[in-house]
């Protein structure tokens, strides 16, 4: 075993244990982040075409299956359904397989298949397994046109049917203020609704790529329909807005910053909310402002009630 492979296996093992520890302690957001980061690294190795890999094709397939199981556990932690979950005790069976991947020759314990490598990063993945500082690419995208290509259709959902006495919310994302707005490539916003533990309460939605950029603003002018009646949201819930953009030098889509709105801020009319540094903190415990400058996410809220 080369020193490079030994180091790689040690990092994978450390990441696996961190995720499982967070999971067993009930720190679900941290566990999900760690699982998704490791899953992507494993997927990348499983699908690597380089000739200097010490892993055989069969070992790469096993690595890909472990990545699938990490994603299944991550999905189970985010689900409100209790049936058909991939449990922590199931996941822990994979740690010795990952550790001894070069000598493992038994049948994989779960009937899963490797999944394709995704190019959108998990929250916090910019820091990666080595915890390197994620530098900003100054000048990336400079000189690009003011309008963005319409290549990301988004995943916006229609308004729910109205119910007597119940309130629906439409959030129009007007624009976001950023000092390097003109350098953002293919930016869009991911909108989610989380409870205090960071668990999704509604389906996650992505806006289309922004319509234009102007000075220190990226403009969206798109409506997001809340996929739950306001009265049915749990206490402490919040709506999150993650601003994402493409990094050509690293060839992936990354979260740049995020904002959130709590339930007492749901009022008709315009609202501006502060921007925070990544990684997205769905539990709202370690918040750090993105900038001291007066740059915000600009929204306009409309309430619909029968």
Image (cartoon, rainbow, N blue to C red):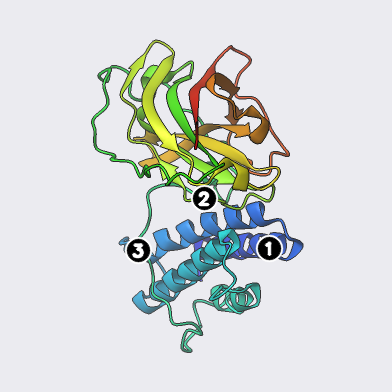
Q: Which sits in the foreground, 129 or 273?
A: 273
Which residue lies at the image location 47% right of the left edge and 87% below the top edge?
A: 105
Could you classify mark 3 by the number of other residues whose Cα lies within 10 Å: few (under 14), some (14-19), or many (20 or more)?
Answer: some
Q: CA distance from mark 3 to mark 2?
A: 32 Å
Q: Earlier in the sequence, mark 3 or mark 2?
A: 3
Residue at the spot 39% in from the left edge and 66% down from the top edge = 46
Numbered tag placed on residue 202 in the rendering: 2
Left or right: where 179 falls relative to 91: left
Looking at marks 2 and 1 on the same chain, the residue that comes earlier in the sequence is marked by 1
Residue 139 visible to an observer of this rendering:
no
Per the rendering, the mark at residue 47 is 3
Which of the two marks, 3 or 2, is nearer to us in this view?
A: 2
What is the secondary structure assignment of the residue under circle 1?
Answer: helix
Going by the image, does 64 lie left or right of 16? left
The span from disc 2 to disc 1 (Cα, nearest Å) is 22 Å
Secondary element under disc 2, as helix, strand or loop, is: loop
Mark 3 or mark 1: which is in front?
Answer: 1
Which mark is nearer the camera, 2 or 1? 2
Q: Is residue 244 above or below residue 54?
A: above
Q: CA distance from mark 3 to mark 1?
A: 27 Å
Q: Tags 3 and 1 in contact by the CB under 8 Å rule?
A: no
Q: Which mark is residue 23?
A: 1
Name the one closer to the observer, 250 or 149: 149
Quarter of the image where one finds residue 156: top left
User: The residue tagged with tag 3: helix, strand or loop?
Assistant: loop
Q: Position of residue 222 (x, y in %)?
A: 37, 29
Q: Earlier in the sequence, mark 3 or mark 1?
A: 1
Q: Which is more toward the observer, 277 or 168?
A: 168
Mark 3 touches mark 2? (CB < 8 Å)? no
């Amino acid at each position: 075993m080369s020193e490079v492979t030994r180091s790689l296996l040690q990092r994978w093992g450390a990441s696996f244990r961190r995720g499982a520890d967070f999971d067993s302690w009930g720190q679900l957001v941290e566990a999900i982040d760690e699982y998704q980061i490791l899953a992507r690294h494993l997927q990348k190795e499983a699908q690597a075409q380089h000739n200097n890999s010490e892993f055989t094709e069969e070992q790469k397939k096993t690595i890909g299956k472990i990545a699938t199981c990490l994603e299944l556990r991550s999905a189970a932690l985010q689900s409100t359904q209790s049936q058909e979950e991939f449990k922590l005790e199931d996941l822990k069976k994979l740690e010795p397989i990952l550790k001894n991947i070069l000598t493992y020759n038994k049948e994989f314990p779960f009937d899963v298949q490797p999944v394709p490598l995704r190019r959108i990063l998990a929250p916090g993945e910019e820091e990666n397994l080595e915890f390197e500082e994620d530098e900003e690419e100054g000048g990336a995208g400079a000189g690009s046109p003011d309008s963005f290509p319409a290549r990301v259709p988004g995943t916006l959902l229609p308004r729910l049917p109205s119910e007597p006495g119940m309130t629906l919310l439409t959030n129009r994302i007007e624009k976001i203020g950023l000092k390097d707005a003109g350098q953002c490539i293919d930016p869009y916003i991911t909108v989610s609704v989380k409870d205090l533990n960071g668990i999704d309460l509604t389906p996650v939605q992505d806006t289309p790529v922004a319509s234009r950029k102007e000075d220190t603003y990226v403009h969206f002018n798109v409506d997001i329909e809340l996929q739950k009646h306001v009265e049915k949201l749990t206490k402490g819930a919040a709506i999150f807005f993650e601003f994402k953009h493409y990094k050509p030098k690293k060839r992936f889509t990354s979260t740049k910053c995020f904002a959130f709105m709590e339930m007492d801020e749901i009022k008709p009319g315009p609202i501006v909310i502060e921007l925070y540094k990544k990684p997205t903190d769905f539990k709202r415990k370690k918040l750090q402002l993105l900038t001291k400058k007066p740059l915000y996410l600009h929204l306009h809220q409309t309430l619909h009630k029968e």
